[in-house]
Image (spheres, rainbow, N blue to C red):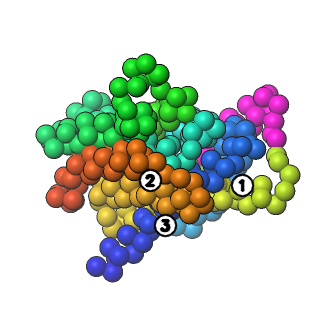
């Protein structure tokens, strides 16, 4: 029981920092270009990740770096693609709306696992995917799904849909990843991300660093909080709790984002509240089997 309580606490810390990434990132993109923010995020995170991997996992670094090619595609899709799409989306929509769309991600991952890995979905899980999708459409349409036929999706909405698709691909690739050192593997992915982003940022005229002490605080938060602390806490929880059961806690990202935004004075609409509740119910239905049979479930993904 003590170990489970510690794991639950670790999950709360992880999701709290990931929620903070939406709120802080949403404010930061008003002065930072998304490419610059992503580049700084992983440049700050890479050394702490290597240090933590060495202290916690003590991997054989020769073997870890020997598999560097396997880190390239996950780094491009998960660490770069997802975050560039997320931060760009936050230039066009608010943190609450983005987090509500992101709440559909666990259901989308379950659907992807069914399509590509032939993971069986129960009738309840299939209904959960449909319910969660209905909730997302309710949020995207502002409570009037029929309006999507005439107005279509907003730019920020489409970018967030692209972001959760990228995260789904990254998560599904992670299930096939070899090695027992997730922090070390993520450190190598972060290094690949930095190597790729440096020339991209320079060629696009960057980096552009706004003046002020707030800039340093923003960069330290996104580089250490959601990139390092959350990941370490997540993996600490997985030492005790089965992955799919832990995955349900990802819904707290939306809850924490709404609470943080409301505390900062951002109004939350009735459509967002209702649609978000429907999404959370649908995701809970999709992952209900994880709580009924936690010992047998090994199928959930881990975020970065």
**Helix, strand or loop at mark 3:** helix
Q: Which mark is residue 31?
A: none
Question: Which quadrant is home to the N terminus?
Answer: bottom left
Q: Give the side of residue 129 with respect to residue 143, left or right.
A: left
| Magenta extent | 190-208
Residue 73 appears at what percent x and percent y? 52, 33
Total marks shown come to: 3
Which SS class for mark 2?
helix
Q: Earlier in the sequence, mark 2 or mark 3?
A: 3
The location of residue 157, given as percent across then percent down, is 50, 33
Which residue is outermost to the top?
150
Residue for badge 1: 219
Residues under labels 3 and 1: Cα distance? 19 Å
Q: Earlier in the sequence, mark 2 or mark 1?
A: 1
Q: Does the image show residue 58?
A: no
Instruction: Tell me the residue that label 3 is attached to.
Output: 13
Whether residue 22 is visible, yes or no, is: yes
Q: Would residue 272 appear left or right of 203 to someone viewing this image? A: left
User: How far is disc 2 from disc 1 in space, using C-alphas?
Assistant: 22 Å
Which residue in the protein does label 2 denote? 254
**Residue shown at the point (20%, 43%) measured from the top left:** 125
Residue at point 55%, 28% (across, down): 155
Location of residue 57 in the rendering, given as x and y in whole percent from the top left corner = 50, 63
Residue 29 part of the magenta segment:
no
The answer to the question of whether label 2 and label 1 lie on touching residues, with beta carbons closer than 8 A, is no
Identity of the residue furthest to the right in this view? 211
Residue with the most extreme left position: 123
Of badges 2 and 3, nearer the viewer stands 2
Cα distance in 3D space between marks 2 and 3? 14 Å
């Amino acid at each position: 029981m003590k170990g489970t309580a510690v794991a639950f606490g670790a999950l709360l810390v992880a999701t709290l920092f990931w929620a903070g990434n939406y709120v802080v990132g949403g404010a930061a993109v008003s002065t930072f270009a998304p490419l610059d923010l992503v580049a700084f995020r992983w440049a700050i995170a890479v050394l702490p990740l290597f240090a933590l991997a060495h202290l916690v996992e003590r991997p054989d670094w020769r073997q870890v770096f020997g598999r560097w090619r396997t880190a390239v595609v996950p780094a491009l899709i998960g660490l770069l693609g997802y975050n560039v799409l997320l931060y760009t989306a936050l230039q066009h929509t608010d943190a609450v709306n983005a987090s509500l769309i992101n709440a559909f991600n666990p259901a989308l991952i379950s659907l992807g696992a069914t399509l590509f890995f032939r993971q069986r979905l129960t009738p309840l899980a299939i209904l959960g995917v449909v319910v969660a999708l209905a909730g997302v459409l309710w949020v995207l349409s502002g409570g009037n799904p029929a309006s999507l036929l005439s107005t279509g999706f907003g730019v920020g909405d489409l970018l967030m849909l692209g972001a959760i698709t990228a995260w789904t691909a990254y998560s599904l690739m992670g299930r096939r990843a070899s090695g027992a050192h997730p922090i070390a593997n993520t450190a190598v992915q972060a290094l690949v991300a930095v190597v790729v982003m440096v020339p991209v940022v320079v060629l696009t005229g960057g980096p552009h660093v706004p003046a002020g002490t707030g800039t340093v605080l923003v960069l330290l938060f996104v580089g250490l909080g959601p990139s390092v602390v959350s990941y370490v806490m997540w993996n600490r929880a997985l030492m005790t709790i089965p992955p799919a059961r832990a995955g349900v806690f990802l819904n707290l990202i939306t809850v924490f984002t709404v609470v943080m935004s409301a505390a900062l004075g951002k109004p939350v609409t009735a459509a967002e509240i209702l649609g978000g509740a429907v999404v959370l119910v649908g995701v809970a239905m999709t992952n209900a089997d994880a709580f009924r049979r936690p010992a047998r479930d090994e199928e959930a993904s881990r975020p970065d």
